[in-house]
Image: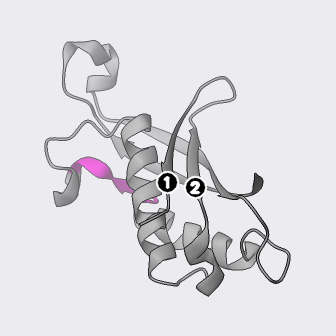
């Protein structure tokens, strides 16, 4: 299996509901270094997994929707604990939609898998991996 990874980051504010989260129930900020890893069993006709420039641009566009935003104020996240794990899946699903729409080029539609990893510090991260096959 081949893979290509692109990286970006975004900064958010949010709070959590529930005793599990202790002090994180209060409004706080986070900066996520974000890795998008694309997997393909074989290379495409140009001998690449995915166009790195397009992948970087589309990832940046998705993350910019949330950069410097209080996630608690967005209707799509109303009543949701926007944990690192939750956000990893949310971003993976948005990127999968872009891939299927052809935003990363035609050959990206035949990618096998995608993994989003959100690094919330140098010692902690969470990831979500999904199939891209329809």
Q: Residues within 10 Å of mark 1 (few under 14, many from 20)?
A: few
Measured as percent of width and height from the top left, residue 26 is found at: 27, 27
Task: Say which element carries label 1.
Answer: strand
Give the class, few, some or many, for how many residues have Cα within 10 Å of label 2's Cα (few <14, many ≥20): some
Question: Residue at 60% of width from left, 86% of height from top?
Answer: 106
The residue depicted at 75 percent of the width and 68 percent of the height is 49
> Where is the C terminus found, in terms of image quarters?
bottom left
Vertical arrangement, residue 26 with respect to residue 45, above or below: above
Question: Does the magenta-highlighted stretch encompass residue 133?
Answer: no
Give the residue at mark 1. Answer: 131
Residue nearest the observer in this picture, 15 or 1 = 1
> Dot 2 corresponds to which residue?
113
Closer to the camera, 68 or 114? 114
Label 2, label 1: how far apart the Cα atoms are: 4 Å
Relative depth, front residue between 41 and 16: 41
Magenta region: 66-72
């Amino acid at each position: 299996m081949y893979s290509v990874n692109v990286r970006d980051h975004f900064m958010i504010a949010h709070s959590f509901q529930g005793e599990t989260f202790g002090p994180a129930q209060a409004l706080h900020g986070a900066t996520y270094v974000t890795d998008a890893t694309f997997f393909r069993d074989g290379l495409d006709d140009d001998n690449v997994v995915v166009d790195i420039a397009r992948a970087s641009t589309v990832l940046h566009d998705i993350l910019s929707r949330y950069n410097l935003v209080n996630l608690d104020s967005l209707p799509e996240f109303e009543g949701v604990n926007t944990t690192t794990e939750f956000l990893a899946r949310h971003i993976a699903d948005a990127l999968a939609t872009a891939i299927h729409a052809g935003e990363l080029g035609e050959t990206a539609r035949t990618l096998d898998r995608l993994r989003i990893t959100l690094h919330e510090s140098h010692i902690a991260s969470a990831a979500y991996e999904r199939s891209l096959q329809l």
